[in-house]
Image (spheres, rainbow, N blue to C red):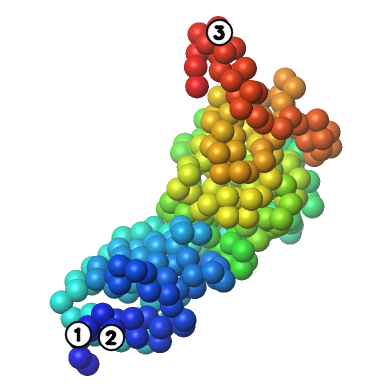
Amino acid sequence: MAEFSTDRHRIEFIISAFGDAKVARDGKNVAVKCPSCGEKKKKFSINIHTWMCHCWVCGIKSKNLYYILKKHIGESTAIRFKSQAGKITIDEKIDDCSLQIVELPENTIMLASYSGLDPDILATRAYCTRRGVTVRSMWYFKICVSKSPQFRRKVIIPSFDKSGKLNYFVSRTIDRNGFPKYINSKVKKTNIIFNEMNIDWQKEVSIVEGPFDLIKSDQNSTCILGSKLSEKSALFNKIVENKTPILLALDADMKSESHKIAKSLSSFGVSVRIMDLRGKLDVGDLSSDEFKKLKINSTTWSSDMGLKYKIRSIKSGSIF
C-alpha cells in the first residue's frame, strides 16, 4: 500500500480512523475525539509529522499513533497505518505504560464471597475486619485475594475507569514485617483516576491518599495513591475541566501538601475544602460516620488560609 505522501493523505487517514477532525493553524497537529476517555470535545491531539499523540483530558499518550490505533480503534486500522507509515519507525516496545493492559493476579477470589478454610485468606479477611472494612465495603470495592504465591496474605483492591474497565490495582501485605509491603500495577498512577466509575464530577469529590482511606470516605471519592497531585495528572485535569469542588482529606502529617494542592487547584478556579482529622493519623483510622461529621465541618481553603499556615510553619521551623 502507498505511503502517506502528503499531509492531506495523513489527515484523511485520521478522519477515517477517528471521525471528524480539527486541523490546527500550523497544519501539523490534528485534534479528534479521544478514543480512550470518549471526551466529546476534540481534545486528542495528533502530530501528523511525528505521529506523537496525547489527550489533554485523560492524559493518555504515545510516541506513536500505532499503539493507540491497535488498542482503541482496531487491529486492521493499526496494520493499515503501519503499512502506510513508510519510513516512520514503529518501535514494537510500548513506550507508554498507560497503554498496558491491566490484569488482576492469577487465582483471584472475591474476599466477601470466600467460604473456604484457607488460613491465609481467612487471616486476610480478619485483617480487613480489624481495620473496619465491612462485608458491604468488600463487595462495593470488589476487594480480592489471590492464591498465587506472590500475592498470598495480601489485600487486593482494584480500580476501574469510567467505563468499568480495570485500570489499576493495589495489593498490601497484612503482615507487619511483610515484604514487599505493596505490589501495585505497573501503570503510571498519574495516568489513571482510581475508581472513576464511582465518581460524579458535578458534585464535590473527596480526595484521600490510599485505597484503605477511600473505603472509609464517602462514595463520591477517589485516592491519589500517595500524597501529591501533579498538575499533569489525569485526575487534576479532570477536576479542572469540570470545575469540580474538592474536599482534601490527606493524612494529618500532610498538611503542607494539602495546602500546596489546594493552592494549585484554586489557581484554576476550583473550590477546595480541607478536612481537619482532629487528632487521627489518617482517614483510615476513622469510621464512616466520623468521616461524615468531619466533612461537614471542613474549611474552605483561601489564599489567606494558606498564608496563615505558611507563617505558622515558619515559626515552627518549617515552610511549604
* Location of residue 22 in the rendering, given as x and y in whole percent from the top left corner: 42, 75
Q: Is residue 184 left or right of residue 6?
A: right
Question: Counting residues from the N terminus, which is met first, the one under dot 2 or under dot 3?
Answer: 2
Q: In the figure, residue 285 lies in which quadrant? A: top right
Residue kind at label 1, given as amino acid type: Ser
Task: Point out residue 177 in the picture as x, y percentages from the top left corner.
Answer: 52, 30
238 sits left or right of 61 in the view: right
- Indicate the secondary structure of the residue bearing disc 3: loop
Q: Residue at x 58, y 55 (%)?
A: 241
Which one is in front in this view, the residue at disc 2 or the one at disc 3? 2
Q: Does 218 appear above or below 261?
A: below
Q: Residue at x 64, y 23 (%)?
A: 304
Q: Secondary structure at mark 2?
A: helix
**Residue 287, how many percent across, how many down?**
79, 35
Label 2 is placed on what type of residue? Answer: His
Image quadrant in which the N terminus is located: bottom left
In front of the other: 203 or 266: 266
Crowding near the residue tagged with mark 2, few <14, some 14–19, many ≥20 C-alpha atoms within 10 Å: some
**Which residue does the numbered mark 3 point to in the structure image?**
316
Between 273 and 101, the one nearer to me in the picture: 273
Mark 3 is on which residue type? Ser
Q: Quadrant of residue 316?
A: top right
The x and y percentages for residue 20 are: 47, 81
- The residue that mark 1 highlights is 5
Left or right: 88 as drawn, with respect to 177: left
Query: Extreme bottom residue here?
Result: 1
For the question of whether residue 30 can be seen, the reply is yes
